[in-house]
Image: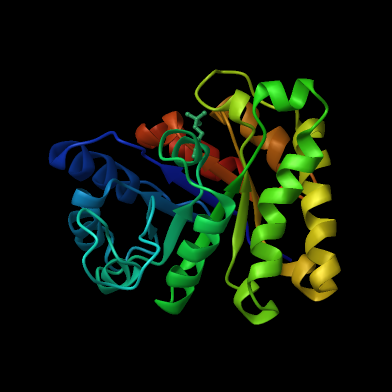
Amino acid sequence: MRQKLVAGNWKMHGSREMTDALLKQLLAARLPTAAMLVCPPFPYLQQAASSLQGSGVLLGAQDCAANESGAYTGEVAATMLADLGVSHVLLGHSERRQYQQETDALVLQKAQQALAAGLKPVICVGETLAEREAGQTEQVVLRQAQAILQGLTAQQLQQVIFAYEPVWAIGTGLTATPQQAQDVHALLRSAVAEVSPQLAETMLLLYGGSVKPDNAASLFAMTDIDGGLIGGASLDADQFLAIGYAAE
Ligand SMILES: O=C(CO)COP(=O)(O)O
């Protein structure tokens, strides 16, 4: 069976004080049996790594560079993240696809760098409201996923996690119904099965988009939903923990 994973994407929120307080509160509680991952902004990764040391809570970053090293001002290499104790990296989040014009090809390049550094890429895919209304959900999600599924080897794909985040559900309070989410997750899993049936059994597929303590359990109960990628609710330790317990 796949062990569920609940990941918190802090986005561009936080401070040293907040990082300290939130992680202290998390570690003071009984940790969920589901794996828990926090993804603070870059400047707080080192602080978070030292707070989380030995706790079992995993540390992730929100992005990495598409190149290994060199004259890329402002970029952060995957190897630097690994050096800090980061184990996962979010890639291709819809906010980056939208505001930084990230393409499927760029997301693949970043995934290659992440894998070479020993990080697990969490590849975010999802359709906009206009795309859903135009009946293009499957086409968009498959295009984004296929860029990764065809661009990496089966061995590399063993380290990959997908997160389905319908853009219309992010930060809006609108959640996909469990069935809507399950339908897309099943589609993703069958695309993975075309690469390798064994890989489809083990690959984690997370759902993200307005996951809260009161809707998490019904989402996580679906066959192909292996946990969540949590935005707003991950900034509150009690809510993040409650979502983690819903994944047990
Ligand atoms: O984008 C998300 C996580 O990456 C979801 O954000 P919200 O949970 O705030 O909707």
Name the residue at the front extreme.
71
Query: Is residue 189 found left or right of 67 in the rendered image?
Result: right
Q: Is residue 248 visible?
A: no
Where residue 24 sits in the image (x, y, percent)?
24, 46
Q: Is residue 153 above or below residue 127?
A: below
Query: Is residue 178 found left or right of 214 in the rendered image?
Result: right
Going 58% across and 52% down the picture, which residue do you hit?
A: 104
The quarter of the rendered structure image containing the N terminus is bottom right
Write down the quadrant of residue 148 in the picture.
Answer: bottom right
Going 39% across and 53% down the picture, which residue do you hit?
A: 63
Name the residue at the left extreme.
17
Name the residue at the bottom extreme.
155
Query: Is residue 76 found left or right of 199 in the rendered image?
Result: left
Where residue 110 sits in the image (x, y, percent)?
46, 62
Where residue 87 sits in the image (x, y, percent)?
40, 67
Q: Is residue 207 above or below residue 111?
A: above
Q: Is residue 164 above or below residue 210?
A: below
